[in-house]
Image (spheres, helix red, strand yellow):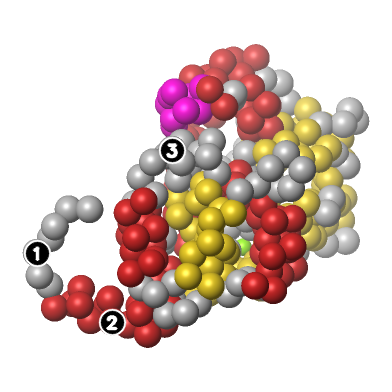
């Protein structure tokens, strides 16, 4: 860590962190395959230790995923600190929700969209300082066919993207990797028919992609909806009903800001429960992982996980 010199505010913050954290027990789960999982967490870990946390590092295995690891050990800990990207958090979602352990996020992934949603800094050392400071918020989770997610679940284009973007490409190319593979899939993408059951109605639509967001960001800084938050009790659905890939180009700035619902060929609404049916089963991408298929039943799980977040 760079020496920033002596700052009174640092000393005061450090003192507050120690008051909050001293003697608390934290399990630390780091995804060794995360983009920055190889190194760089040592300094973050030191911040947590200096704040008085008792850290025990635990590893997932092929027989035990992050949720199972958290559930099995929950009684011995006050919090679970997860180092990884959105996929790693997704794997921990069920364990966090059922155990009630507070989540600390060390962003080490390619995109870190949940961290972005919560205003947690991308720098693991700064993120560790947030955990040490101890300020918490309670967030909702989305659920699709029994699988929990933090950010967004999609059917169509982005599920294909997740299927084709290999671990290798993610590491090598980072956000650029999304762009290259996305362009390739876009060139050949076609609209498909789906039936959307929500709030007492059924809509038949032709779409390129349907996304159901719980949080605010996904896909490396894209925005589900400009007012969406992870604690508003709502799922935000949007459907891209553009009939040609080049029309999507014009939408890109809006997709970034979350204002795509203002375009004629984008359907967007808030709901708490929705079912999406397709003629052929289609994969559902939740936070970058393909976990289930249509028909897909979505619902909000309000106030499911406590998270350490920046104050104010
Ligand atoms: Mg929400």
Task: Residue lying at the far bottom in this picture: please name it.
Answer: 19
Q: CA distance from mark 1 to mark 3?
A: 28 Å
- What number of labels is visible? 3
Position of 190 relative to 131 (above/below):
above
Q: Are marks 3 and 2 in contact (CB under 8 Å)?
A: no
Question: Is the residue marked 1 within 8 Å of ligand 1, measured from its CB?
Answer: no
**Nearest the camera: 309 or 229?**
309
**Nearest the camera: 105 or 63?**
63
Can you give x and y, in whole percent of width and height, for residue 77 in the image?
Answer: 61, 72
Dot 1 lies on which element?
loop
Stretch in magenta: 169-178
**Nearest the camera: 207 or 133?**
133
Q: Earlier in the sequence, mark 1 or mark 3?
A: 1
Position of 156 relative to 9 (above/below):
above
Can you give x and y, in whole percent of width and height, for residue 191 in the image?
Answer: 73, 26
Q: What is the number of the mark on residue 5?
A: 1
Q: Residue at x 67, y 38 (%)?
A: 289
Residue 293: image quadrant is: top right
Q: What is the number of the mark on residue 46?
A: none
Can you give x and y, in whole percent of width and height, for residue 136 in the image?
Answer: 50, 76
Q: Earlier in the sequence, mark 3 or mark 2?
A: 2
Give the residue at mark 2. 15
Give the residue at mark 3. 38
Can you give x and y, in whole percent of width and height, for residue 291 in the image?
Answer: 76, 40
Residue 120: image quadrant is: bottom left
Q: Are marks 2 and 1 in contact (CB under 8 Å)?
A: no
Dot 3 lies on which element?
loop
Position of 105 relative to 23 (above/below):
above
- In the image, taking residue 4 as reference, residue 117 lies left or right, namely right
Residue 105 in sight here: yes
Q: CA distance from mark 3 to mark 2?
A: 30 Å
- In the image, taking residue 57 as reference, residue 292 lies left or right, namely right
């Amino acid at each position: 860590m760079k020496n920033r010199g002596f700052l009174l505010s640092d000393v005061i913050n450090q003192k507050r962190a120690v008051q909050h954290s001293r003697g608390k027990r934290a399990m630390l789960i780091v995804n060794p395959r995360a983009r920055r999982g190889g190194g760089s967490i040592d300094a973050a870990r030191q911040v947590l230790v200096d704040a008085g946390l008792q850290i025990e590092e635990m590893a997932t295995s092929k027989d035990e995923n992050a949720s199972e690891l958290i559930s099995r050990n929950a009684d011995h800990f006050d919090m679970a600190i997860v180092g990884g990207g959105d996929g790693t958090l997704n794997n921990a979602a069920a364990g966090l929700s059922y155990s009630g352990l507070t989540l600390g996020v060390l962003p080490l992934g390619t995109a870190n969209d949940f961290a972005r949603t919560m205003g947690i800094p991308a720098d693991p050392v700064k993120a560790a300082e947030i955990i040490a400071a101890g300020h918490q918020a309670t967030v909702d989770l989305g659920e699709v066919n029994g699988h929990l997610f933090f950010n967004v679940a999609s059917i169509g284009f982005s599920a294909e993207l997740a299927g084709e973007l290999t671990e290798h490409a993610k590491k090598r190319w980072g956000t650029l990797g999304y762009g290259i593979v996305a362009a390739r899939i876009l060139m050949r993408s076609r609209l498909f028919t789906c039936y959307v059951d929500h709030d007492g109605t059924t809509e038949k639509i032709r779409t390129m992609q349907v996304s159901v967001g719980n949080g605010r960001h996904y896909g490396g800084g894209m925005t589900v909806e400009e007012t969406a938050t992870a604690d508003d009790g709502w799922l935000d659905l949007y459907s891209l009903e553009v009939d040609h890939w080049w029309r999507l180009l014009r939408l890109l700035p809006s997709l970034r800001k979350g204002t795509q619902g203002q375009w004629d060929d984008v359907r967007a609404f808030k709901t708490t429960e929705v079912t999406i049916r397709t003629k052929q089963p289609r994969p559902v991408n939740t936070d970058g992982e393909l976990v289930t298929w249509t028909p897909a039943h979505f619902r909000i799980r309000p106030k499911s996980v406590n998270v350490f977040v920046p104050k104010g």
